[in-house]
Image (cartoon, helix red, strand yellow):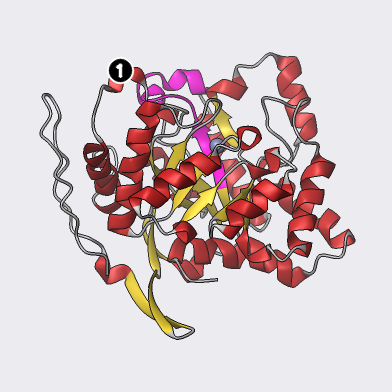
């Protein structure tokens, strides 16, 4: 059981401290692994409350139910379209019918997270949804000022153990992001706060990263300095590169590989790695023995203020590239991998067992 940490957070002017919290140590289960014992999380928090990890099933580990900006769904919901809730529920039902049981929503507060909407969407569709705490854009929005890492840790821990946005709906994963230009100074502070929240709660981290710039090297160095166990970390958007040396280096650190953006990066449809390139990378990693490191996802959104307001030709192009949204992997990628000789056991390992182990902290 992790010791409760004295964060020493300072009471900054105008900073309302989060309510105190108790660690969810009752969720930790001791398991024997080889000749040592490890604590694993057998119950995690979905937006509808505690969820046994045995119920996760086939899991997409980086998607967006709704993506916009902080406050938009609450203040200007008309920008999401009048029927946005119906669109969300019907797409989630279709995804569930297509063989997906759980969706990790990688939208943090600055990406317009709406905890009440996520809970309602989960309840109406039957899809398990895991929500994220943390900061999701490449740097901390400038008007947020200069809170320190311990102040950030305290609010992230509160979202993981007490609730988000004035509700008792809890986050179940910690999300952070760094992109072009690496880990910016303001994001480094928040990243260290997320690392401390990870250590206090045991909840895993999912990191938006910039593969072409090998930004994960910097993110991993900071997390190691903070003492985060690398098997609690997933580095995302790795299919944006075909550099197997870089990808396997990340796996060899102990991290999970977020093999998402399938079929592509939506905003660079012509510049990024092709679908064939992405599928070949998956196959190469399976052949190299990295099956147990990979989690698959699309990084798509059902409702998105960014995508929904693109010119029609661009939206048509995106729809043509991915007409299946959250079912592209099931409908296109797995059949292709099967033709290449990948077994059903491997599919099950990647879609079901790896996400479960990632959330539990179960050794591979
Ligand atoms: Zn994303």
The stretch of residues the image draws in magenta is: 62-81
From the image, which quarter does the C terminus lie in?
Answer: bottom right
Q: Within 10 Å of the Cα at label 1, are there few (<14), some (14-19), or many (20+) other Cα atoms?
A: few
Q: Nearer the viewer, residue 35 or 170?
A: 35
Find out whether residue 76 is within the magenta segment. yes
* 348 sits to left or right of 28: right
Residue drawn at (49%, 33%), measured in percent from left and top?
A: 178
* 297 sits to left or right of 215: right
Q: Nearer the viewer, residue 220 or 295?
A: 220
| Residue 166 position (above or below residue 244) | above
Ligand 1 is located in which of the four quadrants?
top right
Residue drawn at (50%, 61%), measured in percent from left and top?
A: 358
Residue 53 spot, x, y in % from top left: 46, 67
- Which residue is disc 1 drawn over? 143
Residue farthest to the right, as pictured: 339
Find out whether residue 163 is within the magenta segment. no
**Residue 280 visible in the current orientation:** yes
Residue 273 spot, x, y in % from top left: 77, 36
Residue farthest to the bottom, as pictured: 35
Q: Nearer the viewer, residue 248 or 44?
A: 248
Residue 223 spot, x, y in % from top left: 41, 48
Identify the secondary structure beneath mark 1.
helix
| Residue 38 position (above or below residue 135) | below
Residue 39 spot, x, y in % from top left: 36, 73
* 364 sits to left or right of 347: left
| Residue 156 position (above or below residue 53) | above
């Amino acid at each position: 059981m992790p010791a409760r940490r004295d964060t020493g957070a300072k009471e900054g002017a105008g900073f309302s401290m989060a309510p105190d919290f108790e660690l969810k140590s009752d969720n930790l289960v001791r398991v024997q692994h080889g000749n040592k014992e490890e604590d694993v999380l057998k119950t995690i928090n979905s937006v509808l409350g505690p969820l046994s990890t045995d119920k996760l099933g086939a899991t997409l580990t980086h998607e967006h139910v709704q993506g916009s900006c902080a406050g938009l769904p609450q203040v200007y919901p008309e920008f999401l379209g009048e029927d946005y809730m119906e669109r969300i529920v019907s797409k989630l039902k279709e995804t569930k019918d297509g063989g997906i049981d759980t969706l990790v929503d990688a939208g943090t507060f600055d990406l317009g997270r709406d905890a009440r909407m996520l809970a309602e969407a989960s309840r109406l569709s039957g899809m398990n949804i895991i929500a994220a705490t943390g900061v999701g854009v490449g740097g901390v929005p400038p008007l947020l000022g200069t809170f320190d890492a311990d102040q950030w840790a305290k609010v992230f821990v509160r979202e993981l153990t007490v609730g988000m946005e004035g509700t008792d709906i809890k986050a179940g994963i910690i999300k952070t992001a760094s992109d072009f230009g690496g880990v910016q100074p303001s994001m480094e502070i928040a990243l260290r706060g997320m690392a401390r929240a990870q250590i206090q709660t045991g909840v895993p981290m999912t990191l938006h990263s910039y593969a072409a710039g090998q930004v994960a090297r910097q993110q991993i160095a900071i997390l190691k300095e903070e003492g985060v166990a690398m098997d609690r970390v997933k580095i995302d958007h790795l299919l944006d590169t075909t550099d197997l040396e870089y990808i396997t280096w990340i796996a060899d650190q102990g991290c999970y590989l977020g093999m998402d953006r399938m079929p592509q990066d939506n905003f660079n449809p012509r510049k990024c790695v092709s679908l064939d390139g992405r599928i070949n990378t998956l196959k190469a990693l399976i052949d190299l023995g990295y099956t147990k490191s990979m989690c698959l996802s699309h990084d798509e959104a059902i409702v998105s203020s960014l995508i929904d307001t693109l010119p029609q030709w661009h939206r048509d192009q995106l729809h043509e590239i991915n007409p299946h949204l959250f079912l592209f992997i099931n409908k296109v990628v797995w059949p292709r991998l099967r033709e290449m000789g990948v077994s059903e056991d491997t599919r099950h390992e990647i879609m079901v067992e790896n996400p479960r182990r990632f959330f539990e902290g179960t050794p591979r």
